[in-house]
Image (cartoon, rainbow, N blue to C red):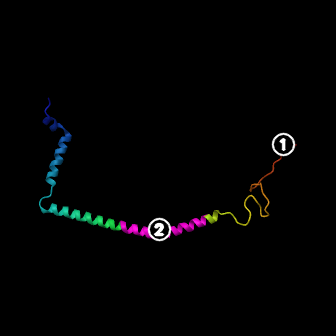
Amino acid sequence: MTDHRNDRQRNAAWDAAQQWRERARHARPQGNVGGFRLLATWLLFGVLMVVGTVLGLFFLLVGWAMLPFLRHRMKKRMERMRAEQAEDIGGFDRYHDRRGRHQDVLEGQYEVKDDDRNR
């Protein structure tokens, strides 16, 4: 059988992991400075959370306050669109002329060509 201890010593990943452990062990803060940093970090995080919540509620309330104005503006826009699409109420439409006669002719410019069959 192989010796696992020798395999670990020759493994580059194992060496890198051991180096990380040593650096982490030496990088730990000593004394009250670490506790103070931890407390300051948590306080800063808490303040940012409160500020974010207050800003979110503020924008929510502003959005709710703007809804009636936005609804009014959209209603006016829809009325304007309906008025543009509505047909003329003068008593005729596109199939009847102003005298009430029925028209089967499409509007546009037409050219009459001679038919060779009629000759």
Coordinates of residue 50 in the picture (x, y in percent): 29, 66
- Three-letter residue code for mark 2: Leu
Q: Which residue is mark 1?
A: 116
Q: Quadrant of the N terminus?
A: top left
Residue type beneath disc 1:
Asp
Q: Position of residue 49 (x, y in %)?
A: 29, 64
In the rendered view, tell whether residue 87 sits above or below residue 119. Answer: below
35 vs 8: above or below = below
Foreground of the two, 102 or 32: 102
Q: Position of residue 62 (x, y in %)?
A: 42, 69
- Pointer 2 with pointer 1, Cβ within 8 A: no
| N-terminal label among 2 and 1 | 2
Q: Left or right? Give the position of 80 relative to 2.
A: right
Judge from the rendering whether residue 52 lies leftward or rightward of residue 108; answer left or right.
left
The numbered dot on residue 24 is none
Read off the magenta span.
56-81
Q: Which residue is mark 2?
A: 67
Q: Residues within 10 Å of mark 1 (few under 14, many from 20)?
A: few
Which residue does the image show at 53% across and 68% down from the upper left? 73
Q: Where residue 56 appears, x then y in whole percent?
A: 36, 65
